[in-house]
Image: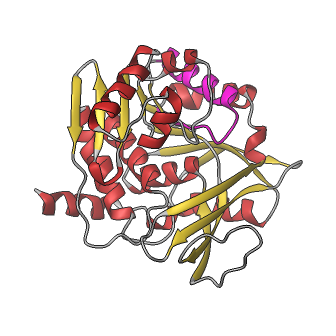
Amino acid sequence: MDRADIVVLGTFVADLAFKAERLPVIGETLLGRGFAMGPGGKGSNQVIAAARAGARSAMITRVGQDAFGEMARQTWSGDGVNTSHVLIDETAPTGAAFIFVSSETGDNAIIIESGAAANLSAADVRAAAQLISGAKVFVTQFEQPIEAAIEGLRLARSHGVTTILNPAPALPVEASIYAHCDYVTPNETEAATLTGIDTTTEEGAVRAAARLVELGAANALITLGSKGALLHGAAGTHFVPAFRVAKVVDTTGAGDAFNGGFAVAIAEGRPPLEAIRFGSALAALSVQKPGTAPSMPTRAEIDAFLRAKG
């Protein structure tokens, strides 16, 4: 059935993750300390996070007719994701990502090639109008063409669907996009890029959030890593602390875990601050495992974690 509570427009890419002490400089070769290949892409990570957290979830994207595309289909099938609007693109390969993971800190640096998803169009989004209009939450990012993201946000908003824009990677965009957003969810680096405001201080983060609201977003939700998250909008300004974890293994995908979890909680009718806490739990659990999609927790793990935290 062409129904879902959460619809995600975005990319799938095959994650090629290399672990080393540091990135090499130009002309240098380093021996790695580990390698893993698995499913990734911000949109795909977010839809898997949402599905494992208990929501009926659907993906809108394009993949190639290749081995990575087959990886995508198997991944979504395993988590029960609706793929009725995943298109097979015969002119481009499925996307891929180079991921460097520090063996010392777990921090990461990433290069993305969107591949077939770069061909997503506004027409592709309109073809999924029935799916989008029946959802509770619509989520998108900037790894696929911005025109497709705008059309998805506009279409969802016109049907009363809550819209979440995760503006990653941060790109120059027309301010008009924000008028279609119930929540804009950049991390602190992306918020600084989008607004030109230094977000390294609490005051700066608030100013950047206020600027995003001035540009038209109903709410700005800036994730601040280990410092938590900042929500600014109609309900005022609130800082929500992050959960502490014993050991960070890999931060790749933590933002996607947060966005997927936040979307699920909003779809369940939870208030925004409670939804942030729910999303933060997903992020905290995800960083304790390697990988992106494979690190997304189940609903049982999330509920147990939140009970333990009180």
Please give the name of the residue rendered at 37% of the width and 52% of the height, measured from the top-left corner: 54
Between residues 290 and 241, which one lies in front from this camera angle? 241
Residue 275 versus residue 214 in the image, above or below: below
Return the residue found at the far left.
310
- Asked if residue 154 lies in the magenta stretch, the reply is yes
Give the x, y percent position of residue 110: 61, 58
Give the x, y percent position of residue 229: 30, 42
Give the x, y percent position of residue 272: 26, 33
Count of number-bearing discs:
0
- Relative horizontal placement of residue 44, taking residue 251 as reference (left or right): right
Tell me the quarter of the image containing the N terminus. Answer: top right
Quadrant of the rendered image containing residue 119: top right
Q: Which residues are magenta?
A: 138-159
- Relative horizontal placement of residue 53, taking residue 148 as reference (left or right): left
Residue 81 versus residue 206 in the image, above or below: below
Whether residue 270 is visible here, answered yes or no, is no
Please give the name of the residue rendered at 67% of the width and 65% of the height, measured from the top-left corner: 71
Give the x, y percent position of residue 185: 43, 36
- Relative horizontal placement of residue 67, taking residue 72 as reference (left or right): right
Whether residue 166 is visible here, answered yes or no, is yes
Between residues 288 and 126, which one lies in front from this camera angle? 288
Please give the name of the residue rendered at 45% of the width and 34% of the height, measured from the top-left corner: 191
Tell me the quarter of the image containing the C terminus. Answer: bottom left
Judging from the image, the colouring scheme is secondary structure
Please give the name of the residue rendered at 30% of the width and 54% of the height, measured from the top-left corner: 226
Residue 103 versus residue 196 in the image, above or below: below
